Amino acid sequence: MKGRTRSAAEKHLHDRLANEVGCIACRADGIRNMMVSIHHIDGRTKAGAHEKVLPLCAGHHQDGTGAPGLIAVHPWKRRFEVKYGRQLDLLDDCTEILSERESIE
């Protein structure tokens, strides 16, 4: 996929989301799933695009790629948000989780 090159800080954020948060949708379902890819909430080329991201497992990211029955943000954005909340709210949840982890360390 095309997009702006990530900075070192953005790569670090993506690594932390993947390694410390895991799939935010699975987490909402009470499941810890650390096998994630980074979903860009609002494209990959806009300013700040690599900061507006969510860690999602295959099944919550792309339809037909994960366990059957999961609601994927692509192509089911509306259904995904009905079940899990707005993507920007999920981003806030991720930020809060990372902040809590920083305060513990």
Image (cartoon, helix red, strand yellow):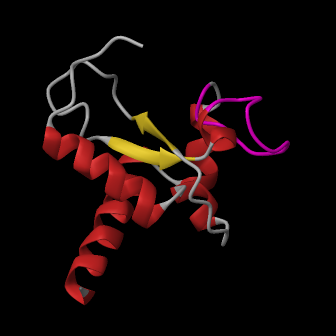
- Magenta-drawn segment: 62-74
User: Horizontally, is 40 left or right of 71 in the view?
Assistant: left
What residue is at 33 percent from the left and 47 percent from the top?
Answer: 14
Residue sitting nearer the eye, 42 or 79: 42
Q: Which quadrant would residue 23 be assigned to in this image?
A: bottom right
What residue is at 24 percent from the left and 73 percent from the top?
Answer: 99
Residue sitting nearer the eye, 9 or 89: 9
What residue is at 59 percent from the left and 51 percent from the top?
Answer: 35
Judge whether 63 appears above or below 90 on screen: above
**Where's residue 43, x and y in %?**
34, 23
User: Magenta part mainly helix, strand or loop?
Assistant: loop
Q: Quadrant of the N terminus?
A: top left
Which residue is most to the right?
A: 68
Judge whether 46 appears above or below 58 on screen: above
User: Horizontally, is 54 left or right of 44 in the view?
Assistant: right
- Magenta stretch: residue 40 in it? no
User: Horizontally, is 44 left or right of 8 in the view?
Assistant: right
Which residue is most to the bottom?
A: 104
**Where's residue 51, x and y in %?**
24, 41
Q: Which quadrant would residue 2 be assigned to in this image?
A: top left
Labels in figure, total: 0
Q: Which quadrant would residue 104 be assigned to in this image?
A: bottom left
What residue is at 85 percent from the left and 42 percent from the top?
Answer: 68
Judge whether 3 appears above or below 52 on screen: above
**Where's residue 22, x and y in %?**
51, 59
- Magenta stretch: residue 65 in it? yes
Q: In which quarter of the image is the C terminus?
A: bottom left
